[in-house]
Image (cartoon, rainbow, N blue to C red):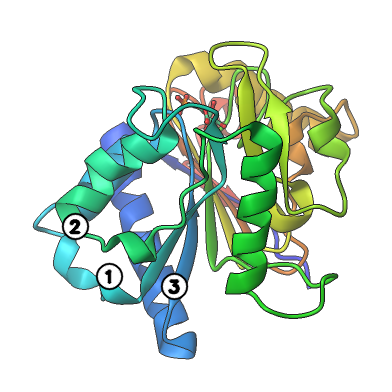
Amino acid sequence: MTHAREIRIMRDANELAREAAELFLWLGEQAIAATERFRVALAGGTTPATLHATLASSEYAHRLDWKKVRFFFGDERCVPPSHPESNFRMADVTLFQPLKIASDHICRMKGEEQPETAARQYEQTLRQEWPGSDSSLPRFDLILLGLGEDGHTASLFPGTSALDEQTRLVVPSTSPKGIQARITLTLPVLNRAGAVLFLVTGQKKSGITRKVLENSAAGGPSWPASLVRPISGRLIWFLDQAAAMDLTVSRQGMNSREE
Ligand code: 6PG
């Protein structure tokens, strides 16, 4: 059963982080109650840092059994884990260290390796985490994603072959800007998740947010982010008012909508 897309618009990035933390904890509690573990893939970039800080704060940190959480990554820049541009480093500084997450609960994409080697190693990691036939896909309880101004998500960039991958779980990719060499989860893995939560803030993202959420829904061109449609999981978009300012609902003065 495909869930309806859920869009929620929050006042600002801080309110969005608090609401995202509440949802993260709720999904974590549900997963741990059902399976004794919560397997989540973190997003890269800068937006998630506020969510991480909120989860690690004294108000939230005690509300989940972190020993039962296993952390993965949606993508990584091909740099060492100590590099300022490393997605692992951002998560380590803002989340893992403050929460004292044990290293064996963190499955890091090895950005220091050659991209193809790192991608194959990570695919092996996923297949060990989710044993089963090679055709079965890992089902993350939650995948956090961001949105780039070109419509990319994870490291699935417009016009790249990574977007077309339907068999591999993890592939090398190329970003047109910044650290170009990347590795990324593929769309089949993203669309297998129990829940996908996009976190988008800031006016710079308002144009692409409208295109992804409204144009592609209307049969217009699709961007990588609009190809994320979980087969049987929840698709949730958390936007702050700045990122949502070009949406029809914003112009109509509605606060949030379910579709
Ligand atoms: C990355 C991310 C990427 C990110 C978007 C938004 O490695 O950069 O995976 O998909 O989520 O580019 O980035 P910001 O949160 O920095 O705007």
Residue under numbered circle 3: 38
Q: Position of residue 98 (x, y in %)?
A: 16, 50
Q: Quadrant of residue 27?
A: bottom left
Secondary structure of the residue carrying tag 2 is helix
- Up the image or down, 170 lies above or below 103; here it is above
Instruction: Give the residue pinned by disc 1.
Output: 66
Quarter of image, res 223: top right
Amino acid bearing label 1: Trp
Please tell me how crowded label 1 is: few (under 14), some (14-19), or many (20+) other residues with Cα within 10 Å.
some
Q: Residue at x 60, y 18 (%)?
A: 149
Structural crowding at the residue carrying mark 2, measured as other residues with C-alpha within 10 Å and reported as few (<14), some (14–19) or many (≥20): some
Residue 135's place in the image compared with 144, above or below, is: below
The residue wearing badge 2 is 99
* Residue beneath the point at 19% across and 57% down: 99
Q: Are marks 3 and 2 in contact (CB under 8 Å)?
A: no
Residue 124 horizontal side relative to residue 42, left or right: right
Report crowding for label 3: few under 14, some 14 to 19, many 20 or more residues within 10 A (C-alpha): many
Image point (78%, 23%), residue name:
158
Q: In the shown orientation, is residue 173 left or right of residue 109?
A: right
The answer to whether 113 appears left or right of 241 in the picture is: right
Q: Earlier in the sequence, mark 3 or mark 2?
A: 3
Please state, as top left, top right, bottom left or bottom right, where the C terminus lies in the image: bottom right
Residue at position x 25%, y 61% in the image: 101
Between discs 1 and 2, the one toward the N terminus: 1
Of residues 175 and 4, the one drawn nearer to the viewer in this rendering: 175
Q: Could you tell me which secondary element the residue under label 1 belongs to? A: helix
